[in-house]
């Protein structure tokens, strides 16, 4: 996942490098604060600068755009990239985004209900024929969404989240479920967020997903964003130094699916173990470690 | 130092059926000497989403400028629009023209389930949106406690490559909108008035040449001293390279409820041989100051000899 660009050339070169190194997908986050690039134009340019690399937002804040606008942009990107879009959407969580841009920050239940309607609108507009929708948040009247995407019935939809409600929605509706920390506090680096994604907490999240998904659970791809990746020969010391700041034990720090720390071998083993334990087969790392992490990708991608 | 009023040309297009076709169109437009590829922003009739498609067109070309003609302001929050244009400006090396209007096509609003407010409200909202765009692109944090948008201490990123900001293009047809464009825009698009919410005979009659002159006066009034710095643009909706302009006009005019003479005189018509069109555009530049000429995708190739002769002169 790459949020920044020093220059157009650097951004293009990084994307091409990720493609060469065997990564599947180039993800762009969606925030107003501390994240310099807007996902739609950035993904479009990356898709045009590469030939097989998939692109996606991880994830779009649903409240920042009307789903009719979003559906058209997503379908355009899928069409013009020959079917390389993965469409990540979430309920929106970062308080600073809402406050600074002046977008009303409703309580989580309302944001999640709106996301559910938005997913219905996205699917409806990407399907064949005119679509109407009479929701609490969106009203669509006889609109035949254009263009239609190349990937049918629609590009894979990623829904990411950390709480039971949004993960249950993701399990019912998404093709790829992003299992994240719970960001109910509106910030990512709090101990509340860290405690919500320990190994034990992740076990519980998987149960929520499994329960809500029912029969379709086996068709879902499980994804996690490894927000913290650090290469070291002494991961124990690193964990001991860092864990207290997040209110977790060193063991918990190494066990959580959002951390990879250690040597290439240790990371490789962790990624394999996480697929066994949580069925997570889709791991996203920060753009800063694309090259360092490449040996893990080379060893495991496609296996 | 006012604007030099050298001719430049743009093509407005909205469709492609594949990435390969889109890329090819963009490269053709570039190779024919056009300055800019523009995309409209509507939801009815097959059209690609402009922000995505112009990004791809920029990446597929080297020097071609890309822009929106024009974004409907009500479809996206201006903080989102500011960030998208700035991203595109950075990643294209400063090749973006940010075209925005108040929104007019009623069927779009119906499709999205958005309120179709009175023109006055839409224009007031556009005025605030322009302040949000400029604020987000400017240095440091800014706040706008507006009627329609409320931005607080927001330091927009990225900052665009073009400074102080990418050229802002505001297009419109009525006095209020054109005065606003004169005050705030870098490029002003002189259009028929679309107050009916669709392209009707009202809009056609509003595009006769005498009205175009009047519209430019409205721009001048809003612009004051900065009028000489503005670039004026017309999108020619009736455009054809032909040896028989009279015959074509007689065939087309009745459909628009105009006489053949009025059709040929229309401020959005340029019909004739390459020589006749070049003469017309030069006359209009002398009289109206309009130096930025935009045609449709269908005329892109046939109009190219005009571009070759006039671009940069």
Image: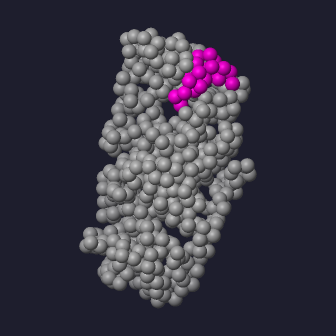
Q: Is residue B9 above or below residue A1?
A: below
- Residue B85 x, y percent position in the rendering: 43, 53
Using the rendered image of the protein, determine whether residue B154 is visible from the camera's viewpoint.
yes
Counting from the top left corner in percent of width and height, residue A73 is at 53, 49
User: Quick check: is B123 in the magenta stretch?
Assistant: no
Q: Main secondary structure of the magenta part?
A: helix
Quadrant holding the N terminus of chain A: top left
Q: Is residue B43 left or right of residue B23?
A: right
Residue visible at 36% across and 30% down? A20
Q: How is the image coloured?
A: one colour
User: Is residue A204 within the magenta segment?
Assistant: yes
The residue at the point 34 percent across, 55 percent down is B162
Residue, x 39% and y 77% (percent of image)? Answer: B224
Q: Position of residue A31 (x, y in %)?
A: 50, 42
Residue depicted at x 57% and y 15%: A276
Q: Position of residue A237 (x, y in %)?
A: 42, 11
Residue A303 makes an appearance in the image: no
Q: Closer to the camera, B15 or A238?
A: A238
Write down the region rendered in magenta.
A188-208
Relative to residue B85, is residue B272 depicted above or below? Answer: below
Residue B28 sits in quarter: bottom left
Query: Looking at the image, which is closer to me, A288 or B11?
Result: A288
Between A127 and A168, the one lying in front of the other is A168
């Amino acid at each position: 996942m790459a949020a920044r660009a020093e220059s157009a050339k650097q951004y293009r070169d990084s994307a091409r490098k990720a493609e060469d190194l065997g990564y599947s997908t180039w993800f762009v986050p969606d925030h107003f604060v501390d994240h310099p690039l807007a996902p739609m134009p950035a993904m479009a340019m990356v898709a045009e600068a590469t030939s097989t690399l998939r692109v996606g937002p991880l994830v779009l804040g649903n409240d920042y755009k009307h789903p009719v606008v979003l559906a058209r942009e997503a379908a355009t990107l899928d069409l013009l990239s020959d079917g390389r879009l993965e469409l990540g959407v979430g309920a929106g969580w970062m308080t600073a985004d809402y406050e600074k841009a002046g977008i009303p920050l409703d309580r989580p239940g309302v944001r999640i209900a709106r996301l559910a309607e938005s997913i219905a609108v996205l699917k409806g507009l990407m399907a064949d024929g005119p679509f109407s929708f009479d929701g609490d948040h969106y009203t669509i009247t006889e609109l035949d969404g254009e263009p239609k995407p190349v990937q049918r019935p629609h590009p894979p939809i990623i829904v990411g989240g950390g709480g039971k409600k949004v993960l249950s929605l993701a399990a019912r509706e998404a093709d790829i479920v992003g299992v994240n920390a719970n960001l109910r506090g509106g910030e990512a680096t709090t101990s509340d967020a860290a405690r919500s994604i320990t190994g034990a907490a992740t076990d519980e999240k998987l149960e929520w997903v499994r329960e809500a998904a029912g029969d379709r659970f086996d068709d879902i791809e499980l994804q996690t964003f490894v927000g913290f990746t650090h290469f070291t020969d002494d991961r124990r010391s690193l964990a001991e130094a860092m864990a207290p700041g997040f209110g977790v034990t060193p063991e918990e720090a190494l066990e959580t699916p959002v951390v990879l720390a250690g040597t290439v071998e240790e990371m490789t083993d962790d990624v394999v173990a996480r697929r066994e334990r949580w069925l997570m087969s889709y791991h996203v790392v920060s753009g800063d470690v694309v090259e360092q992490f490449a040996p893990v990708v080379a060893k495991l991608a496609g296996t | 130092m006012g604007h030099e009023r050298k001719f430049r040309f743009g093509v407005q297009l909205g469709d492609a059926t594949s990435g390969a076709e889109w890329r090819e169109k963009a490269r053709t437009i570039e190779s024919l000497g056009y300055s800019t590829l523009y995309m409209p922003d509507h939801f009815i009739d097959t059209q690609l989403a402009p922000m995505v498609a112009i990004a791809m067109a920029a990446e597929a070309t080297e020097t071609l400028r890309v822009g929106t003609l024009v974004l409907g302001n009500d479809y996206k929050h201006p903080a989102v629009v500011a960030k998208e244009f700035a991203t595109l400006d950075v990643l294209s090396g400063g090749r973006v023209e940010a075209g925005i209007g108040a929104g007019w096509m009623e069927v779009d609003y119906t499709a999205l389930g958005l309120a179709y407010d009175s023109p006055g409200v839409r224009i007031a909202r556009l005025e605030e949106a322009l302040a949000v765009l400029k604020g987000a692109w400017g240095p440091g944090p800014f706040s706008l406690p507006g009627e329609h948008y409320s931005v607080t201490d927001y330091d927009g990123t990225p900052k665009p490559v073009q400074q102080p900001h990418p050229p802002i293009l505001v297009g419109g047809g009525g006095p209020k909108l054109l005065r606003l464009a004169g005050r705030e825009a870098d490029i002003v698009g002189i259009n028929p008035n679309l107050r009916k919410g669709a392209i009707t005979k009202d809009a056609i009659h509003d595009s006769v040449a005498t009205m175009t002159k009047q519209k430019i006066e409205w721009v001048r009034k809003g612009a004051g001293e900065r009028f000489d710095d503005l670039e004026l643009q017309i999108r020619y909706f009736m455009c054809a390279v032909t040896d028989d302009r009279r015959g074509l006009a007689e065939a087309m005019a009745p459909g628009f409820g105009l006489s053949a003479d009025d059709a040929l005189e229309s401020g959005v018509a340029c019909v004739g041989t390459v020589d006749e069109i070049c003469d017309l555009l030069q006359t209009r530049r002398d009289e109206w100051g309009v130096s930025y000429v935009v045609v449709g995708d269908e005329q892109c190739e046939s109009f190219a000899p005009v571009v070759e002769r006039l671009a940069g002169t």
